[in-house]
Image: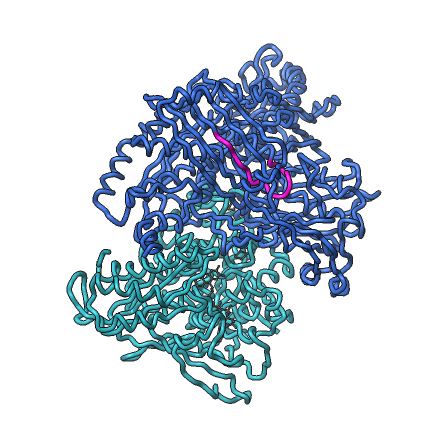
Chain colours: A blue, B cyan
Amino acid sequence: MKNVDSKSHVRGESVYLDDVPLLQGTLFACVYDSPIAHGKLKSVDFGEAEKSAGVVKIITAKDLIGENQIGGILPDEPLLADEEVHFCGMPVAFVLAETEEQARAAAKLIKAEIEPLEIITDAREAQAKGELIAPPKTFKLGDSEKAFSECEHIFEGRADVNGQEHLYIETQGAYAIPTEQGGLKIYSSTQGPTAVQRAVSSVTGLPMHQIEVDVTRLGGGFGGKEDQANAWAAFCAVGTQLTKRPVKFALHRMEDMRMTGKRHPYSADYKIGLDKDLKIVAYEAVFYQNAGAACDLSIAVLERTLFHATNSYFIPNVSATAFSCRTNLPPNTAFRGFGGPQGMFVIESAIVHAAEKLNVSAAEIQQKNLLQDGDEFPYGQIAESDAITSWTQAAEKYDFEKLKTAAEEFNNQNKFIKKGVAVQPVCFGISFTKTPMNQARSLVHVYTDGSVAVSTGAVEMGQGVNTKIAQVAAKILSLPIERIKVHSTNTLRIANTSPTAASAAADLNGKATEMACDAVLQRLLPIAFEMTSDSAYRVSPSGDRSGAPKGATLGEGAPKGATLGGDAPKGATLGGDASHGISFYDGFVYRDGELTSLNWVTLVNEAYMRRVSLSEHAHYATPGIHFDWSVAKGHPFAYHVYGTAIVGVTVDCLRGIYEIDFVKCCHDFGSSMNTSVDYGQIEGGIVQGLGWMTMEEIFYDADGKLRSNALSTYKIPDIYSVPKEIDILPLETERKNLAVFNSKAVGEPPLMYGIGAYFAIREAVKAFNPEISPKFDAPFTPEKVLMNLYSGYLKAAKTG
Amino acid sequence: MIRFILNNQTIETELPKGFTVLDFVRYRKNLKGTKIGCREGDCGACTVLVGELIDKKVKYRTQTSCLMPLANAAGKHIVTIEGINKENGELTEVQQALVDESGTQCGFCTVGFVMSLTNFCLDETPKTNEMAVSAIDGNICRCTGYKSIERAAMKLCDKSEPSAVADGLSCAIEKEIVPEYFKDINFRLKVMSEPAALNRSLQQTVPTRFVSGGTDLYVQRPEVMVHAEAESLFDNTELRFIKESDDFVELGASVVVTDLLESEVFNRLFPNLYKHLKLVSSTPIRNMATLAGNFVNASPIGDMTAWFLALNAQIELSKPPASADGRTAQTRNIALKDFYLGYKQLAKSDDEFISKIRFRKNFTNFNFEKVCKRTYLDIASVNTAISLRSEPPASAGGSSVITKAHVSAGGVAPIPLYLRKTSEFLRGREISQETIAEAHEIIQTEIAPISDVRGAENYKRLLLRQLFTAHFVELFNIKP
Ligand SMILES: Cc1cc2nc3c(=O)[nH]c(=O)nc-3n(C[C@H](O)[C@H](O)[C@H](O)COP(=O)(O)OP(=O)(O)OC[C@H]3O[C@@H](n4cnc5c(N)ncnc54)[C@H](O)[C@@H]3O)c2cc1C
Ligand code: FES
Ligand code: FES
């Protein structure tokens, strides 16, 4: 089943923020942002800008009617700089003008006098100076100190991993429209409609019920629009509040890149201890997270780093501590994986370090330490592990040994081209780690023509969540998918939404939709029972079902709609006596397994005539999860997703460039309810992870200015940089899980397969230059590759 | 007034000729299918088809509408997704392939891919997998990981012949890849076309006196360009030719990189032309990027500049004549290597434009090397080109002597660098490891790279050394 949006996508008819038709009188906004990373804001000169053609109003912090505050977790993030600026790109003022061009021209005329203060861009430096967003957090299991004293081998080192720009192709933006009695309607390109609603409420002083936020879809989010869509919506809202005119702001790419935060860069110290059998006995890590100038989601991201600090491995003695460090960079934020990938990079570095020193393959250590059923994670949850099964299935299906020896043989025969192979297991927990966020609602309306409208809190951004929700409704109601329409995400229809994040949107909102549809169905059952008790309906309609009124078209689409329910007339999964022997299939009612001539439309109309509700608003909360932060133990995840990838690369050792030959993975889908959507998530996730590990290099200079500030200087994978081969093997397992229809979350985990590329490149580099032990410092750009390949030459040049 | 055809509609507009086609279609014509991802030519979300009458046939190429001034649309057929969509709501073969292979997720990049692949279907390139992928080398997608798009692109090859297609356009109309109305475009363009001539009277200030493809100007100063009234040299037929004589090749200044790729002369003289020019920007940008624009932009990493420096090319500079009917009056010639005086400082007056480029064919070997963060569609960290004449002509291994040599390097100085000393040194030397080693030393004295976002100083030094070595590996298989 293809993504329900794909047809309108390829015809260019899907609607994104910048495509919303504008109302007459719409004003355009442009932000004036700080050119200095840290300083005292002495004065701002608007003289020329105010006189500039078309300018209607210039707004600063003191014009806000509400509070100058949009922080989500902590109230530490002003919408507009007031007394100080804290990063380059921090909004200082915004201009409203009659046209976009006029707004931008005027913003250029604004000048701020800023007295420079000390600039910190490095997390370790910030930590040393006591610049922390919140007190550090620690996860502990066993007694690592004691365990180290008994270890055969101990290795210590440092690992660094850079950030990553989201580079959703659609930039951030919002459009605010005044509604009557001082209200606002806001179109926003956001993953978190409620977050936008809260931020707007904060800065305008309006109660939340006066603010409607509507999201049709995003042109990509990846976490970058979870919290960071708020500011742009807040600007438009304030503009509308103060001018009573609609206000629009869609960012230019360079504005977006310099003003928004990215994936957090991390620096970490690790210490790993192994026994003589290569079992990891103890592991300690200290993480320095570069949070940027405000908290944003950093604390939550930091927590997930700790949750995934041991990845797929069972280590009996662990101590992991993490500092969220305040620097003068734009506040870093959520990005697919949410801190997990950074934690995993560090443990993988530690393992590779140990392997290198012990002269064994990293894969041997990895494999010996995989989680087993019943093992305890450092946060107390007990594993139901498919780490070993996924490893074994991948190693067997793709013949890991052969891949490795082939690379070795190739390397023996070629001097200037080297290959490297690495294995990357992944274990990723599904659920928001902040337990209260694991709730969702769905609103289902059945109309009297039998069509069904569904609204949930999930935001469609390409991940196919609307498709999955439509599938859920279609399956429960046994209707063809065309009869279901999933509508925009709107805070008037669904309140208090959790952001679409943590890979959990399909699970949470899908389950809520399942419940809502089920509730409607339960009300229809007795009516169907009664109606089919009338012999008029007991006649099975003739073969083509043409006897059915109006809704007859339903039957034509026959097997199409029921792709999920494959198990024919039992389509509706309503067991037991309550069903009165009634079931539904493809728009028709069956009684005791026999087709009747009662169709969906007739039934729905009868229910309406009997004044039975055809609508339902259902609430779902993930059962069984809990976490106690006072002891940092609990059961935070509904389930884990496992997988193992084998990554192969080829390095051109003359030029220091490389290609990814293959990524072959065994991935745990549970049982996928939509393979075309899910495989797409895997391929896309892998390539995004590869980009992070290879070419994507965020570059801030010492003044905190972003130098990689456009698509010309920040490179994400193009069609030629993707692996020549991506192969996906679905993990075979019988386990039940808490995912919607057993179809596990798939958004984030595959990104982490990309980490394997880093270590595969490292292998190849070492094959050319055995002298070198490249630092664990991602991404492995062509520059780093060449410098490591020719470390000898550089040394000679220096001394010579 | 500017006249052109947009999809099936004839357009006459009084908007400034510097206004971009992107803003025109989206905000003046409400054709919202064309998306904006960067306004820098780097994402392809805004890709449109541009049809032009060439030799009485309409030839389509893709361009990024964000960098395209309306001036360069004049007399042409501009096609957006709305001009491709079938009225009955069904999908074209290209669209269907993307749907079938799940080649669209968030959808924001998708229209750009549809346009590029549609162009692939209606142009004359062989319908091979390689060329299908090549057609989308300027389209960036952040969601799919491209594999599904690649599969869709390959589907478009399966049924076609692996050789050059005679009449791609009629074929595409027949297969309903583009609508029927495309049949009439040829006639409609003929009626409207007014051959571009140099505008005699314009007085403009530097440095936006001239615009060609716009791929530098619209990235660097988009706001200024909208109202700049710059004179477009892009469609000037006098400036778009490639001629070969016994000793020389002569090119018009507005030749774009794609013209080189499609030129018989260039394919003959440069055996690795496709491989090398693929390293330069992307398909839509190569369709817009002129040689003169590359030279005058004077970026230290200009690829075509490095290329022509290594050919020791001459350029012809002209001034627009004073009288409206006069022929191009004053011209002078200068070696490209003498054109660069300092960072973005050129040996040319503001009203001079490049009219021609000329180089001798007396080289036996040519190679081009470029390394960047991302191999394709990226600006070089370092690039270098070399042309040599070796006697006897060296095949792999044999001992021969270099009689002529020109070496260039980019990204290692404030200007695109002709390596004078190195070139001089090579002349008269045997092709050998020793020669290369000695040349390395000289190169290092000629360059002065700085650390920036494209690499640290010592990386660029090392990289040029490697790429210089690579020239000899590629040309003579001499391994270090
Ligand atoms: C996405 C992208 C990728 C790119 N990748 C590369 C790359 O890989 N390698 C590379 O080298 N470049 C690259 N470029 C830069 C650019 O494409 C080239 O420099 C191109 O050749 C410029 O030509 P143009 O006709 O578009 O120039 P324009 O933008 O039209 O003009 C550039 C300058 O030249 C002047 N000019 C133009 N024609 C003449 C003339 N006949 N006489 C005098 N002055 C003239 C203009 O006034 C202006 O100052 C890239 C650009 C983009 C947008
Ligand atoms: S908008 Fe990105 S190429 Fe034009
Ligand atoms: S589908 Fe989202 S960018 Fe390509």
Q: Image check: B243 left or right of A546?
A: left
Does residue A586 lie above or below B451 as drawn?
above
Q: Image check: B342 left or right of A175?
A: left
Give residue B452's position: percent from left, percent from top.
48, 57
Does residue A638 lie above or below A751 as drawn?
above
Instruction: Indicate the quadrant where residue A275 lies.
Output: top left
Residue that protrudes farthest toward the front in the picture: A799
Is A315 contained in the magenta span?
no
Nearer to me, A120 or A210: A120
Residue at 51% of width from left, 50% of height from top? A699
Residue interval drawn in magenta: A285-298
Residue B437 showing in the rendered view? yes
Nearer to me, A519 or A257: A257
Residue that protrudes farthest toward the right in the picture: A181
Residue at 16% of width from left, 71% of height from top? B392
Is A297 contained in the magenta span?
yes
Give residue A665's position: percent from left, percent from top.
39, 33
Q: How many discs mark residues in the rendered view? A: 0
Give residue A626's position: percent from left, percent from top.
60, 20
Give residue A662's position: percent from left, percent from top.
35, 40
Q: Image check: B180 left or right of A190?
A: left
Q: Image check: A174 left or right of B164?
A: right
The C terminus of chain A is located in which quarter? bottom left
Does residue B314 lie above or below A552 as drawn?
below
Nearer to me, B359 or B137: B359
Residue at 28% of width from left, 45% of height from top? A768
Nearer to me, B293 or A453: B293
Residue A672 showing in the rendered view? no
Instruction: Indicate the quadrant where residue B383 lies.
Output: bottom left
Residue at 39% of width from left, 23% of height from top? A280
Does residue A521 lie above or below B210 as drawn?
above
Residue that protrudes farthest toward the left in the picture: B398
